[in-house]
Image (cartoon, rainbow, N blue to C red):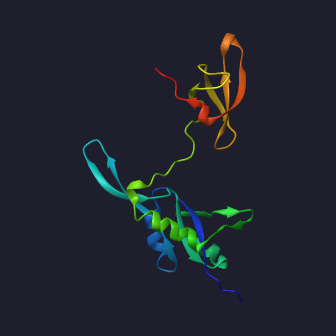
Amino acid sequence: MDMELNWYALRVRPRHEKAAAARLSEKYEIYLPLIREYRKWSDRTKLVEVPLFSGYMFIRTHVKMKYFVLEDQAVSAFVQFGNKPAVIREREIEAVKIMLMEPGTLKVEEGYRFTKGERVRVARGAFAGIEGRVLDIKNKKRLFVAIEPLGKLISIEIDENALEKPRK
């Protein structure tokens, strides 16, 4: 029987990453990349360690242990490719570790710059200067924007890089 250990990404409840990592590390090899950043509250600012990838951590195990891992209350799923848990290569884990050696240069983007319903202004192209509202997000770079001149609703598909937040 093949007992090869691989790295997998786990989706965990946000803000439960450290607790889940502590529990799972008793039985498995866990990697939870952390960065230090300042967090501001109403009465103080504090330097805290937060996960590099909010809501995710890595586990090294055999795929057949999947259901035992999922028993942890904070773990919601294995990140999957198709219908199988996605294997994370050792060199990808090592690359994250190397990046964390220079955390000051690290910047993690949280997905989209714009959200559904948000007002936007077209910065360039045929519709430059016209304001509208994001109707839908097709993928990370293409958005459907509703433009409402003359009481008509016109929907265009446009690249995210051609949009900006409207000036007040």
Q: Residue at x 61, y 19 (%)?
A: 130
Question: Is 145 positioned to the left or the right of 23 in the image?
Answer: right
Q: List x then y, in percent, for residue 61.
A: 59, 78
- The count of marks equals 0
Q: Position of residue 142 (x, y in %)?
A: 67, 38
Residue plotted at (51% across, 48% down): 109
Q: Which residue lies furthest to the bottom in this view?
A: 1
Quadrant in the picture for residue 89: bottom right
Between 140 and 117, which is closer to the camera in this rendering?
140
**Quarter occupied by the N terminus:** bottom right
Q: Which residue lies furthest to the top in this view?
A: 150
> Can you say whether 134 is above or below 86 in the image?
above
| Direction from residue 87 to residue 34 in the image, left or right | left
Snapshot quadrant of residue 154: top right
Taking 168 as reference, is 160 above or below it? below
Which residue sits furthest left? Answer: 43
